[in-house]
Image (spheres, grey):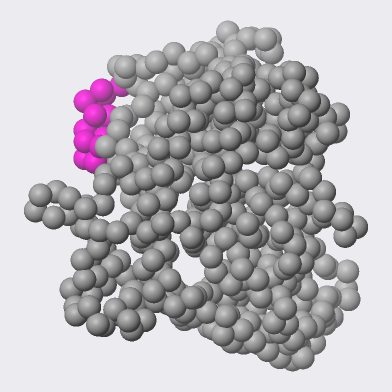
Amino acid sequence: MAGGGGIIGFVANGNFIDAVSADGFRKCVAQEFDHIYILNLRGDIRSQMQKTKEGEGENIFNAMIGIAVVFFVMCESHSNDTQQKAQIHYYDIGDYLDRETKLQRLIDFKHVLRLPLLPIVPNQKGDWINQRGEDFDKLLPLKADKGNKRQESIFIINSCGVATNRDAWVYNFSKENLKASMQTCIRTYNENLANFNVRAFRERHSGVKKDLYKQLDDRDITIDESKIAWSRALKNKFIKSEKCTDLNENNIRICAYRPFTKEYLYWDKTWNEMQYQMPRLFPKDSCENILLNTTSKNLGFSALMSKELSDLHLMSGATQAFPLYYYENGCKECAISNSALETFRVELKDKSLSKEDIFYYIYAIFHHKMYLAKYKFELSKESPRVAISADFRALSTLGLELARLHLDYESVEMFDTVEYESLFAEKENDEFYRVVKMKKGKTEKGDNIIIYNPNITIKNIPEKAYEYKINGKSAIDWVIERYQVSIDKKSLIKNDPNDFRGCRYVFELLLRIINLSLKSVDLIEEISKLKFE
C-alpha cells in the first residue's frame, strides 16, 4: 500500500462475515478501507442443522469451514476521517451448489466487478448480513449484560450447562459402567502423579506455571486414551501435585444430556471441566429445580425444560440455563427478580401475578412462531429478551402446560400404532425390546415408519409428529439418534441405552415422544395465535 493506496486480497474462513465474535473486526475494517468486496462461497459442512448444512453446498477446497474471498481496497485519495465508512460489496454464491458449479460460476464472471454485487450498509452493531433491528434492545433482558451491573434483568442468576471435556468417561446409561470408567481414570491419574519425574518437579518450582500443562508428554503422563482423558484443568491439577480422591458413589447424578435423554453423570469438579453456576442450582442431589434451557448461536434458537442438571450441549449448541430457583445458604430462593415481578405487575395492572407465572410465560414466548421469526437474527447473536404481552395470562397458562408436557415426558401417553413381528408371548420378555440402532423408513404408500428392532416396527407415524423440533431436529430424531448402542473410539467405553432402565423403557419412551411431539405441535399453534408483544 505504498503511496497511500492498494489492495489486500485473501481467502478466509467465511465465519467472520456474520459471527458475533467478529463484530469489532467488521467495524474496524469498515473504517480503515474505502471498498470491501466479499465473495461468500459457503461450504460450511460443520453445521449441525441438516437443512443449513445442505444449503451450504460443497466446499471448494474440501475444507470443513465455509470459505470467503475478500478484497480490502484503499484508494490513493483515502481519508483518515473516522466517520467515513467503506463501501461494502457482497456476493453470495447461493444454496445447494456442488464444488464444480461454484467454480464454474466464478470462472464465468472473469472479473470481480462483473459479479452481481449487493451493496451493504452496516448497522450500529456491526452487522453486514442478517442484520439485527433496534426493537430487540427495548425488550426485557433475561440476564444483565456483562459489565452493566445497573441493568435490570428478569433472572437473578443463570448458568451454562455442565462442560466435562470427557463425556465418554463421566456419562453413561449404566451406573456400573460409569463407576468402572471413573475408577480407571482416577487410578491412572494417581499412578501418574506418584511417578511424576524430576523434570516436571523442577519446572513446577522454577516459577514456570502458566502453560506448564502444555509441556506434559508421555514421559510424565499416560497418553493412552483408553485409560484417561486429560484436559487443561486436569493437567493443571496434576502440575500442582493434587491427588484425586477415590470414587464417591454419592457424586453419581442424573443429568439431562440431550433432549429427552437422561444419563448418569459423575458430578465432580475434578472430572467436570466447568460446572459454572450449577452447584448453586443443584447443591445436593435432593434439591429440586426446573431449568429453562436455551441455545442459539448459528444453530437456531431453541428452548427446553429440564428437572435435572443440564449438559452444555443439551441441544447441540451451548446451553444457557435460566432456573426457577437457586439455593443460597441452604435456602431455596426464586430466581426471578423482584424488579421484574414489579415491572410485569405494573405494566399489566395485575398485583396477583407471580414469579412462576413469568417463568412459564417466557417458555411460551420462546415457542411463539412470530417471536422466533421476527427476532431470528437477534436470538442467534444475543441473549434472549421478551416483551410484556397483553395476552400474558393465556400465554403463561399455555407455557405451563407445555412445560409440564416436556418435564414429565416419561409419563406421557404412548403412541399406539405398533406392529410386532414375533409372537405375542415374547413381549413379556424385556429382551424382546432390546434396541441396537433404530431406523426410519417409509412404506410403499409413503407412510412414516420406524424399525425399532427385528421384532418391532412402529407404523403410521403422522408427518405432523416430526414438526416439533429442537434446534432444527425433530424430538423423534433426537431419540432415534441418542438411544443406540455405541462404543467411543478413543476410550473404547461402551454406552448401552438398554442399561438405563431396561429395554422396554427405551421402546416406551419412543412411543411417548411421538405422542409428546403431536401434543407440542398443537400447543405451539395455540401459543402462536396470541400476541407475543
Vertical side of 43 occupied by 481: above or below: below
Give percent across and percent down for residue 409: 49, 56
Give percent across and percent down for residue 353: 73, 30
The residue at 74%/86% (across/down) is 246
Is 193 within the magenta? no
Q: Nearer the viewer, residue 33 or 167?
A: 167
Give percent across and percent down for residue 212: 76, 69
Q: Answer whether residue 471 is visible to the viewer in this image.
A: yes
In this rendering, position of residue 232 left or right of residue 11: right
Q: Nearer the viewer, residue 16 or 183?
A: 183
Q: Nearer the viewer, residue 65 or 277?
A: 277
The residue at 75%/49% (across/down) is 325
In the figure, residue 125 lies in which quadrant? Answer: top right
The part of the chain drawn in magenta is 97-111
Is 102 within the magenta? yes
Which residue extends farthest left? 444
Vertical side of 110 occupied by 413: above or below: below
In the figure, residue 336 lies in which quadrant? Answer: top right
The residue at 56%/49% (across/down) is 404
Which quadrant is home to the C terminus? top right
Q: Answer whether residue 303 is visible to the viewer in this image.
A: no
